[in-house]
Amino acid sequence: MNTVAAFRLYFKLVSASLRAQMQYKVDFLVSLSFQAALQAVDFALLAAIMLRFPEIAGWNIYEVGLLYGTASIALSLYRTIAPELHDFDRYIVQGTFDSLLIRPWPTLMVLLSRNLDLRRLGGALQGALIFGISARRLAAECAIGSMEIWIMAALALVGTLIPFSLALITASCAFWFGRSADLQTFTMFAPITASQYPLTIYPGWLRTLLLSILPVGFINYIPIRFLLGKGGSWWSLAASPVAAAAAFLVAYSFWSLGHRHYHSAGS
């Protein structure tokens, strides 16, 4: 199957999933609002810390708001487009992954097309709201311009590949261990939470980890630090998409390796 045909099929399957979900519009709107409210509570806790300490490692609440907003957008968009990766364990434990193998299409594409969790867009919208409020305040203080704001927003979208890649690697572990959901706390959720703060507050070994094996710092910290004039160079802007692409290539290679070693649930 060529690339164009694969994408055409993917969008057809996704459209069918969306039509099914839109049959329950009230449920969708309630879930969307609930997800946004949960994210708002997270930021309220962060804001409470920032109100007690006006600056953290030289970053004020609005600058941290940029970090929080971009990280929330990236994580929520990943949860929207790839909920089946998040719950991949059940495909291995229940043996339903076998049903994907008989399809004449790439298994990862079929897996991702089975469901879109549109409720998670509530988290992305809430992250975008925090990002917008913070960016507007910083722009009023002449700390950043409109060009910088658009660059940050674009990099947040590109950065979605990073939590997606971390989730793909984690899900792939189920090919060997049967279960991998518990690993998500360490490989994705904890690192994403850490990236909502300036990485300079962490010890050197942890900063290295968050910029290498778990490269969440490239979603927001590296480019935003440069755009705010807090260090780095123009390389900082190119580093984010390069890191995202590299993370995806590594993750897909690991998925392919696990796929080749899969022996079915009954063997």
Image (cartoon, rainbow, N blue to C red):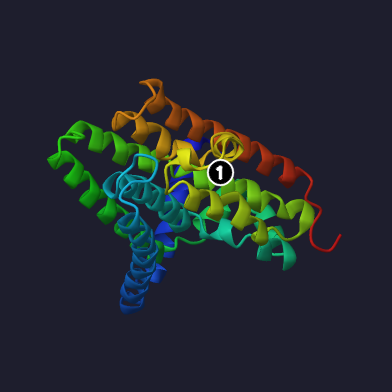
Q: Residue at x 61, y 39 (%)?
A: 252
- Would you name the residue on which mark 1 appears? 165
* Residue 5 higher or lower than 41, as above or below: above
* Residue 126 higher or lower than 59, as above or below: below
* Residue 209 higher or lower than 102, as above or below: above
Viewer-proximal residue among 12 and 138: 138
Q: Can residue 250 be seen in the rendering of this structure?
A: yes
Which quadrant would the N terminus be assigned to in this image? top right
Q: Position of residue 66 (x, y in %)?
A: 31, 45
Q: Position of residue 179 (x, y in %)?
A: 72, 61
Within-10-Å neighbours for mark 1: few <14, some 14–19, many 20+? many
Viewer-proximal residue among 201 and 124: 201
Viewer-proximal residue among 116 and 59: 59
Residue placed furthest toward the top: 234
For badge 1, the amino acid type reads Ser
* Residue 108 higher or lower than 120, as above or below: above
Q: Position of residue 230 (x, y in %)?
A: 34, 30
Viewer-proximal residue among 59 and 80: 59
Q: Position of residue 241 (x, y in %)?
A: 43, 31
Which quadrant would the C terminus be assigned to in this image? bottom right
